[in-house]
């Protein structure tokens, strides 16, 4: 009987590389402690949910996604501006205070952005002159 042809070795497949982190972002607008004019936020790494988080060096302001700022259903899907560095191991309530004391947030009420930064023009909820208001803000790459 004829012999089988020799087996052709399969090429080895390298391990999957982790996804590259997004670019830095530039933020303009806001008010109060969350007031920015062409401020560059540099990507720092990823949170436990896989979302990138950012830092603006001059004022030590962080920008990150928090799926549940109070740890319950009260404030969900926020992109947060805060002077407190996010807890990179937490899945919710990344500011660690249990009360969502932040400097401002872009509310993602339709879960449109998820863990992707909300590039474009939005309303920022921020405390300005002692009162929580909505104010325009723009994020670009």
Image (cartoon, helix red, strand yellow):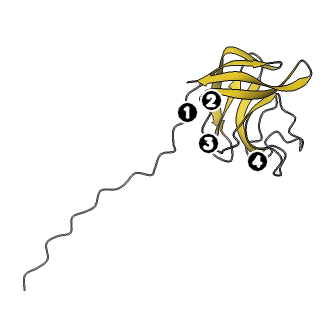
Q: Is residue 78 above or below residue 35?
A: below
**Farthest residue toward the right?**
130
Dot 4 or dot 1: first in sequence order is 1
Dot 1 or dot 2: first in sequence order is 1
Q: Secondary structure at mark 1?
A: loop
Check residue 43 in the rendering and tell me which mark sits there, or answer none: 2
Residue 68 rendering spot, x and y as whole percentages: 78, 47
Q: Is residue 10 left or right of residue 112?
A: left
Contact? badges 1 and 2 (CB < 8 Å)? yes
Dot 4 or dot 2: first in sequence order is 2
Instruction: For marks 3 and 1, give the one nearer the viewer.
Output: 3
Tell me which residue sits at (59%, 25%) in the image: 24
Q: CA distance from mark 2 to mark 3?
A: 21 Å
Q: Secondary structure at mark 3?
A: loop
Residue 97 rendering spot, x and y as whole percentages: 89, 41
Q: CA distance from mark 4 to mark 2?
A: 18 Å
Using a 10 Å C-alpha cutoff, classify the residue at mark 2 as few (fewer than 14 neighbours), some (14 to 19) or many (20 or more).
some
Q: CA distance from mark 1 to mark 2?
A: 7 Å
Q: Secondary structure at mark 4?
A: loop
Q: CA distance from mark 4 to mark 1?
A: 21 Å
Residue 91 rendering spot, x and y as whole percentages: 74, 49
Q: Secondary structure at mark 2?
A: strand
**Farthest residue toward the top?**
37
Q: CA distance from mark 4 to mark 3?
A: 22 Å
Tell me which residue sits at (85%, 42%) in the image: 96
Instruction: Depth check: give the residue in front, 10 or 74.
Output: 74
Q: Can residue 25 be seen in this snapshot?
A: no
Using a 10 Å C-alpha cutoff, classify the residue at mark 4 as few (fewer than 14 neighbours), some (14 to 19) or many (20 or more).
some
Query: In the rendered image, which residue does mark 1 sit on?
Result: 22
Check residue 112 in the rendering and tell me which mark sits there, or answer none: 3
Dot 3 or dot 1: first in sequence order is 1
């Amino acid at each position: 009987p004829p012999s089988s042809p020799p087996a052709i070795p399969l090429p080895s497949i390298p391990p999957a590389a982790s996804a590259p982190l997004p670019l830095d972002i530039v933020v303009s607008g806001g008010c109060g402690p969350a007031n920015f004019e062409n401020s560059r936020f540099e990507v720092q790494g990823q949170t436990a949910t896989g979302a990138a988080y950012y830092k603006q060096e001059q004022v030590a302001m962080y920008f990150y996604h928090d799926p549940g700022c109070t740890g319950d259903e009260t404030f969900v899907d926020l992109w947060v501006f805060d002077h407190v560095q996010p807890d990179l191991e937490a899945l919710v309530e990344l500011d660690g205070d249990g009360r969502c004391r932040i400097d401002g947030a872009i509310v993602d009420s339709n879960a449109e952005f998820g863990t992707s930064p909300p590039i474009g023009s939005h309303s920022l909820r921020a405390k300005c002159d002692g009162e929580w208001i909505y104010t325009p803000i723009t994020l670009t790459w």
